[in-house]
Amino acid sequence: MSVNGPPPFQRFLDEHRVAVWRFLVASVGPSDADDCFQETFISALRAYPKLGRDSNLRAWVLTIAHRKALDVYRARARHAVPVAEPEQFERDSQPPPAARDEELWGAVEDLPQRQRSAVVLRFVGDLAHREIAAAIGCSEDAARRSLHEGLAKLREAAPA
Amino acid sequence: MMQTRTPKPGDVETRLRSARAGEDGLERATQRLMGRVRDQRLADVSYAAVDSPFGPLLLASTERGLVRLAFPEEDVDGVLERLARRVSPRIIESASAFDPARRELEEYFTGTRSGFEIATDWTLISDFGRRVLRATCEIPFGGVSTYKEVATDAGSPRGSRAAGNALGSNPIPIVIPCHRVLHTGGGLGGYGGGLERKRWLLELEGALTPRLG
């Protein structure tokens, strides 16, 4: 029994599920987002009682989601599928995504891992540089640099 | 943001942010998650609202049984917060976990059930409270006792007031029938859920004659 534990899990889930979902859709695409979502919140639930009252729950759960997204990328790389193919598969099997900016998200997918993570955590996860650094496991300066370099590549690859 | 110029629509930043709009699939993913949490018993506490003549009751259960029953006027967030601190923060909403409790309460409120079979979890009850409430559970449907008697049964013949406090903080009212304990002088005494409810429950059980008017 902890005096200063986190809020009831249901409230934590209600408050953060939208952010996690959007982050995962942006990171791994709509077809893998569901499995990652399950894995993220089940990991969170297992670790949950160890958290303190003042934990930054949003940054914490996005850090877990980020790790699950990396697992998906690693699995895709292991299966040695050419980069374009899973995306092609996604396009065929999903109903046409109404407003998904394919050009941009294709370019995001092509970014080096750290830049991709920094961009998605910043603009979809809405995390501060310090929180991005903690999620990726690098310094704040490195996170800032990755974000900057990622954005520069995106401007080039997917011009407005 | 760190940009000095104002991002125009069509900027990469704006386009990245617009990904926040899409939530297709989130409801399905959430329901699948809740199903897995229930099937694999990953949560320590489940809760749900259950209808009653008093309005919606909040019920909370652990693996061991019903741990809390809160009346409609109690603040749900507050009740759940205290459960998080005193039992476990692994708390989820689960209507289906309460099917037997819902059925038994409905039968009780419609007068076709005189005792509860659902298991209870006494985690929230102190040592002395346990003795008092154990004695309270011995009072049969339709019967009443007094603060002094349950205090005596709990091993503290002079502890009427303490027994009253223990009854007043009963975390599982109705199911642990603290409404059956009255003042030694014959008055109704107190009730955590309000005296009107105590009277209503005693009339339902036939222990009190309904007042006219």
Image (cartoon, coloured by chain):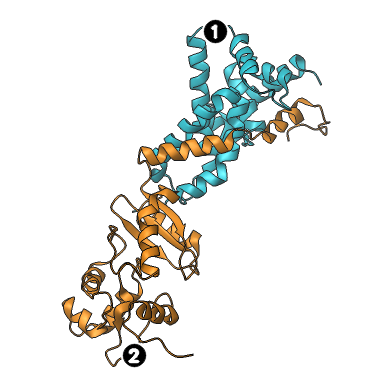
- The residue shown at (42%, 54%) is B47
- Residue type at tag 1: Val
Q: CA distance from mark 1 to mark 2?
A: 80 Å
Disc ID at residue B187: 2
Q: Please identify the residue farthest to the front as the structure is shown.
A: B112
Q: Chain of mark 2?
A: B
**Chain rendered cyan:** A
- Residue type at tag 2: Gly
Does B117 sit above or below residue B36? below
Could you say which is closer to the camera, residue A93 or residue B148?
A: A93
Could you say which is closer to the camera, residue A105 or residue A38?
A: A38
- Categorize mark 1 by other alpha carbons within 10 Å: few (<14), some (14-19), many (20+): few
Q: Which residue is mark 1?
A: A81
Residue A26 in the image: x percent, y percent?
63, 27
The picture quadrant where one finds residue B3 is: top right
Along the horizontal axis of the image, is B30 left or right of B1?
A: left
Along the horizontal axis of the image, is A34 left or right of B114?
A: right
- The residue shown at (28%, 52%) is B64
